Amino acid sequence: MSDASRRDFLKLTVVAGAAAGQAACSELVPQERIRPRPGPEERIKTACGACSAGCGLTVRKVGENAVQLEGLPGHPLNGGGLCPRGVAEIQNLYHPERLRGPMRAAGQRGSGRFQPIDWDTALGTVAEKAKGGGVLLGLGDVSAVERILLARIASASGWKLVQAATPLGQPPLEALRGALGSDEYSFDVAHSDCVLALGHDFLQASPSLAEAQRAALAVRTARPVRGRMIYAGPRLSVTAMYADRWIPVAPGGLAHLALSVAHAILADQARAALERFEAVSARATDFLAFRELVTQPALSPSKVGPELGIPERVILELASELLAWPRPLVMVDRADHDLQLAGMALNVLLGAVDREGGVVSRAPLNLPAELRAPQVETSDLPKSDQAQAVLLYGANPLYLWPSGEWSAALERAAFVASFGPFADESAAEAEILLPTSTALESRQLSLGHAMDGAALLTAGPAAVEKLYDTLEGPEALIRLAQKLGVELPWKDAGEYLSAFADAVGASELLEEGGFKVLATSRVHPAEAETPPTGAPVRLGAEELRGVKAAGGEGLSLEIYVPSAFNGGLGAHLPYLHGIAGTEGREAFRTLVVLHPKAAAEAEVKEAAPVYVQSPRGRIAGIARLSDAIRPDAVAIALGLGRRALGHWAEGHGANPLTLLSEDSRGYGGVGWRCCRVKVGRLA
């Protein structure tokens, strides 16, 4: 057979095979849609829906096409800037592998084969399977208006809400609730003059990266005296590079460092700090127990310093710096329970709670009762034996929890449905796929708070018409509620969003786009001589008694989130791959960052294939040697290692979360920063 004949034969075979496959079972990715021709140009103001932060967005539109995304000038969060995920939202809109309409699994669930169905059938099936008890509703990084609607449906239907988002970069909810009785607090970085970030790489992992970066700039430039920033962690992160000082501490030793700093602060009465501590003790319910704990010799800098591999003077200098500034602030995220408690204890000790440039309460939204979320049972990991049906909304737990409770819950559930625009790992195991519209196709209304506690509303119209048979998230939920027989005050998403806008006097924003500051946080100025008043706080003395510096064989694993994949998301977008690292070779590859000393001991060279192994699992990557990491640590970025999500995600790199044991993944457990691993050469 000639070359020409062979090519013709192959073409005919492919066409015939595609036609037969389409007749039997529709693939997830149909033929590409032809875009309309350009036309008049306009700019649309709205909220960025790439995550739940609610930054302001300006969409440049030519004809029916969104062609450029920029931040909304003057917005309190992003001030005209835009993070990588926001910029990449245009690729979400035009992605060739988006779901084009509702689908049902063809054959056995999890086979990866689906056939199209209509919305009425899809939602009717979900409603039928989700009636009764034993329903788990997994939530990802969803907006406040979606969360409120989901909570109402769950409350009326007896469902249980389960969080399914990475804790890296998220507020320390458990410590805030434990110490202050509420998680409605923020770190007021912009008004602080001395920021200590304990393992919290907030310039690379925050709800709004643009706001975090603007706040860090304000520390340096907003006052006559240039403020200080200090970062403690195992690697020279983006925040550490921006900071004035990097204190290299292994992941499992950060809580121990915080308690040793507290020891040094309480021992230093010569700096006129005793009066402040007496005022704190009047407000903190277990201050005396905490003082007894942290003044023990085992937590002295002379003991802790050698355990952590840092000089004693570093801890003493850190304590002195925090005492020397009027507005010190200690930042932690949600990834480590012990570190949450220790960091919040330091803030209480420094008088940073309810104080400008400290831990400030968020301004109330003052919404009517029907627009507030009801109390619903919520957890961070499901109980797999109770899951008769699992509904996932913007959540992909099989990536963030590759094994354990979530995997068991999905396996045991008789029915699984997934809401989202793409077929990720968890959606591939579902029986029904319900594609929500992308952010640029949806009306936006974002309720949220700035880092200084101010309450904001950002809203705007859909930037473009829907490309496919999808529904806005709130519209899909309201239609599902109607199928379930749940009574809601609104007949559709338009009425629901209008109710929010009308309640705060901003109805025009749904059409015109823009933002409105609803209320500002009431905080005490740092210069006030009297301590802030408010509800008693607790320092978690009993919980902290068991905190020890991590040790053991192997290297401490540091899992971090690059800004391109904030939240562990975005691996399906080529633009984000292109900026995920500093060198082109890093795109689509998992780098294992090692100190040259650790590499020499493992007989590993630069760019060599390596494995990383824990008691839980093993992954492969490419070695990258760097002096900007402790010799006893290894760093791996989160975002790659996808088993689904399309051509640009599937099969590229490795997922470091497979190395974590179950007790290290729960937010209320020991955290995501206490795993020991071994690194070696791949044959």
Image (cartoon, rainbow, N blue to C red):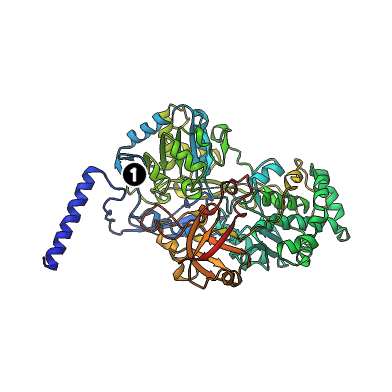
Quadrant housing the N terminus: bottom left
Q: Is residue 632 above or below residue 187?
A: below
For this rendering, which residue is in front, 384 or 286? 384
Q: Residues within 10 Å of mark 1 (few under 14, many from 20)?
A: few
Q: Who's the residue at 73% across and 61% down the image?
A: 307
Q: Who's the residue at 63% across and 52% down the image?
A: 333
Q: Is residue 352 above or below residue 301?
A: above
- Residue 175 in the image: state x and y as whole percent: 68, 46
Residue occupied by mark 1:
111
- Residue 616 in the image: state x and y as whole percent: 53, 51
Residue at the extreme right: 270
Q: Who's the residue at 38% across and 48% down the image?
A: 423
Q: Is residue 202 left or right of residue 259?
A: left
Q: Is residue 217 left or right of residue 406?
A: right
For this rendering, which residue is in front, 20 or 278? 20
Q: Who's the residue at 45% across and 41% down the image?
A: 392
Q: Is residue 265 above or below residue 609?
A: above
- Residue 610 in the image: state x and y as whole percent: 49, 65
Query: Which quarter of the picture shows residue 178?
Result: top right
Quadrant housing the C terminus: bottom left
For this rendering, which residue is in front, 311 or 125? 311
Q: Is residue 471 left or right of residue 621?
A: left
Q: Is residue 222 visible?
A: no
Callout 1 amino acid: Ser
Q: Is residue 678 above or below residue 392?
A: below
**Element type where label 1 sits in the image:** loop
Q: Is residue 661 left or right of residue 122?
A: right
What number of labels is visible? 1
Q: Is residue 36 visible?
A: yes
